Image (cartoon, grey):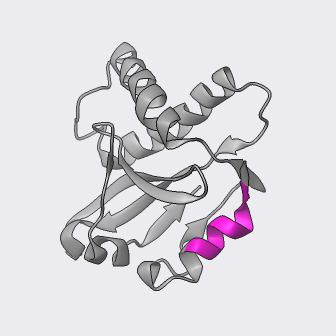
Amino acid sequence: MKMTSKEIRSTFLFSERFMHVGDNIFVADADYFIPSRQWIEEGFHYWFAQALEALRVDKYHRSNDCDNFAMGYQWLANVCHSQSQSETTQAVSIGQVFYCIDGDPDKKHAINVAFVDEGELVYIEPQGPEVIELSEAEERSIFFVRF
């Protein structure tokens, strides 16, 4: 299954949930492969943790903070996907979001977002890695999205 860049943009541009995103959404590719939530949670999370450990960047450090983890998660998801699904030519539908923890503008954080299965939107804390929930205030505070 795939999702177009227009569909991804529309999710963030035309929803009350994401009212602060505005024009701060960047979708680089024309379309994206939608992975299963099972692939993310049962396959890729283990692969990602092993890759970070092999690179010796599996622990938080000021020079390797939340936005670096989110960027690495997105890139390594595409690496893993291309190795396991070589017949699929699209990038995987995993992006980065920047938001405010508890809606507090002084507590900015970067995580990942993915469209899975039939287009369900899930958030991922790459420093776990684990699928997480955002509160309504946190969803409304999302101010940057990049796929």
Residue found at x 22% / y 35%: 61
Residue 108: give x, y in percent of width and height: 27, 64
**Looking at the image, which residue sits at the far top?**
54
Where the C terminus falls, by quadrant? bottom right
Residue 96: give x, y in percent of width and height: 47, 54
Residues 64 and 33: in front is 33
What span is colored magenta in the figure?
3-11
Residue found at x 29% / y 26%: 58
Is any atom of residue 61 visible in this view? Answer: yes
Asked if the stretch drawn in magenta spans residue 5, the answer is yes
Q: Is residue 4 above or below residue 59?
A: below
Residue found at x 69% / y 68%: 7
Is any atom of residue 23 visible in this view? Answer: no
Residue 109: give x, y in percent of width and height: 29, 58
Q: Report how many numbered discs are placed on residues in the image.
A: 0
Magenta-drawn stretch, dominant element (helix, strand or loop): helix
Residue found at x 45% / y 78%: 18
